[in-house]
Image (cartoon, rainbow, N blue to C red):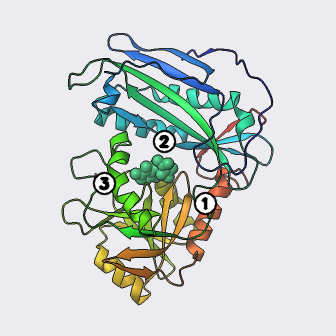
Amino acid sequence: MQIRIEPLADESPVVLPEPLGFGRVPTRRILTCRYEAGRGWADAEIGPRQHFVLDPAAQIFHCGQGIFEGTKAYLRPDGRINLFRPDANAARFNRSAERMAMPNFPEADFVTAIETLVALEHAWTPRTDAASLYIRPVMIAAEPTLEVRSSREYIFYVVLTPTGPFFAGGFEPVAVRVEEHHVRAAPGGTGEAKTIGNYAASLYATEAARVAGYQQVLWLDAVERRFVEEAGAMNVAFVYGGKEIVTPALSGSILPGITRDSLLRLAPDLGYAVREARLDIDEVIADIESGRITEVFCMGTAAVVAPIGRIGHHGRDVIVADGRSGPVATRLHRTLTDIQYGRAPDPYGWIRVLDTVA
Ligand code: PLP
Ligand code: COI
């Protein structure tokens, strides 16, 4: 892929605001690429970040054909930059594209797009602890028509945002509420695709949980409202007896997380057993209360690992163990982030080092 690179008007030194928060601070450049049926992808360009001009009938606004990814660039101790499994994001992006009847974006080009943009914007990579440069590749349907059918025009773009820790409290346990009425995704639906509508569908219950004092929703399956699926926009895991990590098996309505996959591969090397299973919420709650479950945590790119200390269920709160961060979540978080930040060797072949020095 040839990427045309436009100069920036603003070349002044980058000053990162504090606190960074998550997803709020834009960098100066954007990568864009355009698709038309019959022509394919063309016009890859990196230039000053600016607004799109879209017709009000553009299909993204009506049919919601939109998908995105999330991955991060991490500053290494030697000043270079690590990317973590961008090829896995590329593969998932195309699985999402297929489900949403959108065109594929070549996986090698997806990785090149990220590498080129991050190398140009390297000065935005935060140096503070637990901070990173969040990368957001997106594809939207751009054809102006009100017909309900797959678009013939698309825009692929990548934007970046320097981010601090996902949760304001850092590695502090979060509270989740089991959602008994609304569902995030149903069998045969789009839950395993990273498509924008899934997030829209999640907001009502998430806002209600927030008002009630919880940070996230614990989603159950759509058919029986019985089996645990995800925690907010993250995968979830339960630790039995401090030794065995159990996570919901991918059901078709769960997003296959890259953090989840990485932790399932890494945990056995730390001496933990791992298991994917159907987890009945009533059994989970009983196992927390009896002490069989010693920890609960969520997994995702933004937070990496976030302990869950309190679960609201049927109008009452269940505290996980002593309500504090447990040793398994802490160790998994440290081991994976050490690999991501280049503080430890990567025996799994997950890291791509950019030669740019930030
Ligand atoms: N589940 C949902 C719904 C998500 O949006 C995400 C985040 O991308 C995840 C799980 C975690 O996936 P990953 O570890 O690839 O970030
Ligand atoms: C994650 O990276 O874990 C996420 O949940 C992404 C979210 C900001 C959409």
Q: Looking at the image, is mark 2 or mark 1 earlier in the sequence?
A: 2
Displayed quadrant of residue 105 = top left
The amino acid pointed to by label 2 is Ala
Q: Nearer the viewer, residue 204 or 333?
A: 204
The amino acid pointed to by label 3 is Arg
Q: Nearer the viewer, residue 146 or 85?
A: 146
* 163 shown above or below 178: above
From the viewer's perspective, tell me whether residue 215 is left or right of residue 48: left
Q: Which residue is mark 1?
A: 168
Q: Is mark 3 within 8 Å of ligand 1?
A: yes
Secondary structure under badge 2? helix
Query: Where's residue 65, x and y in %?
Result: 32, 31
Q: Looking at the image, is mark 2 or mark 3 earlier in the sequence?
A: 2
Regarding residue 258, the answer to whether it shows in the image is no
Q: Which residue is mark 3?
A: 184
Q: Is mark 1 within 8 Å of ligand 2?
A: no
